[in-house]
Image (cartoon, rainbow, N blue to C red):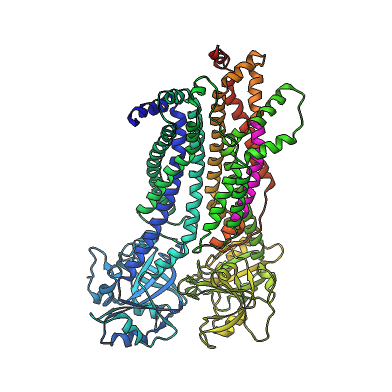
């Protein structure tokens, strides 16, 4: 049977290629966006993991430091003499900056100190290789020079230094000169490899190590050996791929959110398939009826329509996977592996293929097409062949009961209240889907409620339009389903982005009270090697045009080996409420107790609350762990991994660390910010390059980054609205075909072409008004889920919900105007000569 029906399907596609081509393209775009997100994230994570594995090798045991300052290297001496240890390789890792010349820009780099005599057996990718044709050999003795450095491909690309060139690395004592001697094969972010003794002596890490990689003697049980070791609190047992596992866990919510956002395109693609196949079924009613009379069962008609949609989905999915690969390749070339989450900075990964994720995207593409065709297939199945051959009966179903849409909406609201599952807002995503389904199913009831409240027009045309809209309300869902879904999603995204942007703008006003800001490093990790000169804050306060300054200290602080280090902010906090955007009330301060203030992400990650006692691993004269009391929680949109604010005087007293690396500057009246910034740079000297920016510049840059990160939502809004309007056009075209005799009779009764078009337009406007009301309310409900549930559960950021009245009104107005124009365009066939002649078919 199917081989006989296939030619009929192909004939239908040949007669209406653009209609089916648009549906195919909608599915392809959804699959392309979803698959490209999976490709980019998988490629970035795989590149990062491979770089970690190549840099760390495959040791039997990894002993790592619990803090960024490392541990005593006396442990290495003891382990090297252990008879059960075949090889021990010491490593020292330092975050800093590099530059090729005095006037060249700084490049953030990871400096890795190694023992060239031991590294090859454990991590061969870190083994230095001298430049081809160089005068020096690759022998171990030649690799021990205290001034030699080897660059990985990323560092070579950023610094553009040839072998033999001078390389400058920033240390706390000033810039250290090295000579580029060759390369290392390790991928990932910029990396500079030097001798471990040089790293210790020239970067203030004498007698310290970051980790020791161990290869045990064959036959020695790892766990038994570890139980016999007496490790101090400075050392922990790690794994070679711990960093990759940590980034994978932390970026999971980011990757899932991107994937779900991409699936919105598939959702609107499914609605377009629904509209196209509704039109196709309406046009082919005589053919279905004839085949039914000739013996084609109703179930086979349904299977036929579903098979057509599945074929459409397969073709669209194949096209989408190819387009997604192209988009991913282009994004990796232009943007690298970082899509805005900050998890993979500095990486330029090659395209890798996640077979499982791509297969899931393919299945979802076909499923979206088949789901979109389910209702049209049911219409074809319920067709009464004998009546349809005579032009009686149609493909419209019955209006759904208001009870089950209300139940679906209630279930969606209940799911939104559930906690995250595995750290992901999976229940919230399901809530959004149920809210959308329930809202679309509720359209007929809303149409009836609105029309019952409407008065009775005296003019014949509006009266006829309202009566028709009321009695045909069962087809309202088919007509405006795409509009409701697209408007709801557009409203939700608009409110979510506006709320986030408004919250970030208010937050910037609170955290940027000064006129000018200065820092000596590009990150908290690199700040250890880039302190401001002693007495810099006092000298800066004495500069002409400077009213006052506040100095601070940034440094990383490892609280949990499973998470990245939090940022410790040591600043003057005499009045915390004046300098921190606090959330809620402060816990009372206890005399003599160390007070700290934790950011919202830190409070969520470590389950801290005001008044709770915590231990901070602050190395210094007072000890390695300091008890502290959390006095409050503050909002921070800049550091997703958390931050802890502590008073600068308390920090310096506990640690003995007097180094500073940031400055907030208030200008005197009439002072020029550019002149003061130049004076601050000159005061720091060549050994400590500093970056300065005014409050306006930081604000503009921050909001520009925000807008760029959410640019994809604009694309999704446009796609959703266009697909919704195409669905209206397709549904109206199907109704025009089904109502040929009705329009022909109206023409015989005296309605002009313009009046017929106006009739269809008024009917559609009645449905669109109901759809707009449902879509607006539904969008606000989904926005509340995104703002109050998805965002806090995914990224631990909270924000107030902001309703941008003008953009929302513009969305609704644009929908109604475009919908009316679409209805008028589609209604032209209602006034055609074929509609007039259709009345003769029963004569």
Q: Is residue 318 magenta?
A: no
Q: Is residue 425 left or right of residue 8?
A: right
Q: Give the camera-side residue of 315 and 298.
A: 298
Q: Position of residue 345 (x, y in %)?
A: 45, 61
Q: From where the camera sits, is residue 353 visible?
A: no
Q: Is residue 234 left or right of residue 548?
A: left
Identify which residue is drawn at 59% across, 55% down.
786
Q: Position of residue 778 (x, y in %)?
A: 63, 47
Up-down relation of residue 778 to residue 842 (above or below):
below
Does the magenta stretch mainly form a helix, a strand or a loop? helix
Q: Position of residue 167 (x, y in %)?
A: 38, 68
Q: Position of residue 776 (x, y in %)?
A: 65, 44
Q: Which image quadrant is residue 5 in?
A: top left
Q: Which image quadrant is residue 220 in?
A: bottom left
Q: Which image quadrant is residue 235 in?
A: bottom left
Up-down relation of residue 85 to residue 688 (above or below):
below
Q: Give the camera-side residue of 795 and 476.
A: 476
Residue range corresponding to the magenta coloring: 764-786
Identify which residue is drawn at 60% across, 28% down.
823
Q: From where the camera sits, is residue 441 visible?
A: yes
Up-down relation of residue 365 to residue 42 (above or below):
above
| Quarter containing the C terminus | top right
Q: Is residue 780 magenta?
A: yes
Q: Give the camera-side residue of 349 and 6.
A: 6
Up-down relation of residue 372 to residue 215 (above or below):
above
């Amino acid at each position: 049977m199917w081989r006989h029906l296939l030619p009929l399907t192909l004939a239908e596609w040949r007669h209406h290629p653009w209609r089916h081509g648009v549906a195919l393209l909608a599915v392809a775009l959804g699959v392309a966006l979803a698959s490209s997100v999976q490709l980019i994230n998988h490629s970035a994570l795989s590149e990062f993991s491979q770089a970690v594995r190549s840099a760390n090798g495959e040791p039997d045991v990894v002993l790592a430091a619990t803090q960024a300052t490392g541990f005593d290297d006396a442990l290495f001496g003891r382990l090297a003499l252990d008879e059960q240890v075949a090889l021990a390789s010491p490593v020292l890792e330092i975050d800093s900056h590099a530059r090729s010349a005095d006037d060249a820009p700084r490049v953030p780099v990871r400096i890795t100190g190694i023992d060239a005599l031991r590294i090859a057996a454990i991590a061969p990718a870190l083994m230095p290789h001298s430049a081809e044709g160089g005068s020096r050999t690759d022998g171990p003795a030649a690799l021990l020079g205290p001034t030699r450095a080897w660059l990985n491909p990323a560092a070579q690309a950023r610094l553009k230094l040839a072998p033999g060139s001078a390389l400058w690395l920033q240390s706390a004592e000033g810039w250290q000169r090295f000579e580029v001697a060759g390369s290392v094969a390790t991928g990932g972010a910029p990396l500079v490899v030097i001798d471990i003794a040089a790293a210790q002596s020239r970067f203030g890490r004498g007698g310290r190590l970051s980790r020791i990689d161990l290869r045990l003697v064959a036959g020695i049980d790892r766990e038994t050996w570890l139980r016999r070791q007496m490790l101090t609190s400075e050392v922990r047992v790690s794994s070679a791929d711990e960093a990759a596992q940590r980034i994978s866990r932390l970026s999971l919510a980011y990757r899932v959110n991107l994937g779900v956002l991409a699936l919105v395109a598939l959702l609107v693609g499914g609605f377009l398939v629904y509209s196209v196949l509704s039109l196709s079924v309406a046009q082919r009613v005589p053919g279905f009826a004839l085949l039914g009379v000739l013996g084609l069962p109703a179930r086979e008609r349904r299977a036929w329509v579903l098979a057509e949609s599945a074929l459409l989905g397969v073709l669209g999915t194949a096209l989408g996977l190819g387009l997604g690969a192209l988009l991913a390749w282009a994004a990796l070339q232009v943007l690298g592996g970082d899509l805005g989450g900050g998890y993979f900075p500095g990486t330029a990964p090659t395209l890798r293929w996640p077979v499982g994720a791509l297969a899931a995207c393919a299945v979802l593409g076909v499923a979206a097409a088949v789901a979109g065709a389910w209702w049209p297939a049911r219409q074809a199945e319920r067709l009464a062949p004998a009546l349809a051959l005579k032009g009686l009966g149609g493909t419209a179903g019955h209006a759904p009961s208001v009870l089950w849409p209300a139940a679906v909406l209630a279930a969606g609201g209940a799911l939104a209240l559930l906690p995250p599952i595995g750290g992901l807002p999976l229940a919230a995503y399901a809530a959004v889907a149920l809210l959308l389904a329930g809202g679309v199913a509720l359209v007929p009831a809303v149409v009836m409620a609105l029309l019952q409240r409407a008065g009775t027009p005296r003019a014949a045309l509006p009266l006829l339009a309202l009566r028709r809209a009321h009695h045909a309300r069962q087809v309202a869902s088919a007509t405006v389903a795409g509009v409701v879904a697209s408007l709801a999603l557009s409203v939700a995204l608009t409110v979510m982005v506006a709320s986030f942007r408004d919250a970030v703008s208010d937050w910037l006003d609170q955290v940027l009270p000064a006129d000018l800001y200065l820092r000596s490093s590009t990150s908290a990790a690199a700040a250890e090697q880039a302190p401001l000169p002693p007495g810099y804050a006092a000298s800066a306060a004495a500069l002409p045009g400077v009213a006052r300054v506040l100095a601070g200290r940034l440094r990383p602080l490892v609280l949990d080996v499973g998470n990245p280090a939090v940022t410790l902010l040591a600043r003057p906090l005499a009045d915390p409420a004046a300098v921190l955007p606090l959330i809620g009330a402060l816990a009372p301060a206890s005399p003599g107790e160390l007070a700290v203030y934790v950011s919202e992400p830190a409070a969520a990650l470590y389950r801290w609350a005001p008044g709770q006692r915590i231990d901070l691993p602050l190395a210094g004269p007072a000890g390695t762990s300091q008890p502290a009391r959390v006095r409050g929680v503050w909002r921070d949109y800049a550091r997703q991994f958390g931050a802890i604010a502590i008073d600068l005087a308390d920090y310096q007293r506990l640690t003995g660390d007097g180094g500073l690396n940031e400055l907030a500057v208030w200008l005197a009246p009439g002072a020029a910010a550019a002149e003061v910034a130049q004076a601050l740079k000159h005061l720091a000297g060549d050994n400590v390059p500093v970056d300065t920016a005014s409050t306006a510049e930081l604000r503009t840059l921050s909001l520009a980054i925000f807008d760029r990160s959410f640019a994809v939502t604009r694309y999704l809004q446009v796609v959703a609205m266009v697909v919704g309007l195409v669905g209206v056009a397709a549904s109206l075209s199907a109704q025009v075909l089904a109502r040929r005799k009705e329009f022909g009779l109206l023409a015989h009764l005296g309605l002009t072409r313009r009046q017929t078009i106006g009739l269809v337009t008024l009917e559609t406007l009645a449905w669109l008004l109901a759809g707009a009301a449902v879509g607006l309310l539904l969008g606000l409900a989904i926005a509340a889920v995104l703002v109050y549930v998805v965002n806090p559960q995914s990224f631990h950021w909270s924000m107030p919900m902001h309703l941008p009245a003008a953009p929302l009104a513009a969305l609704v107005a644009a929908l109604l105007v475009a919908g009316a124009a679409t209805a008028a365009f589609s209604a032209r066939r209602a006034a055609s000569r074929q509609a007039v002649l259709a009345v003769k078919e029963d004569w």
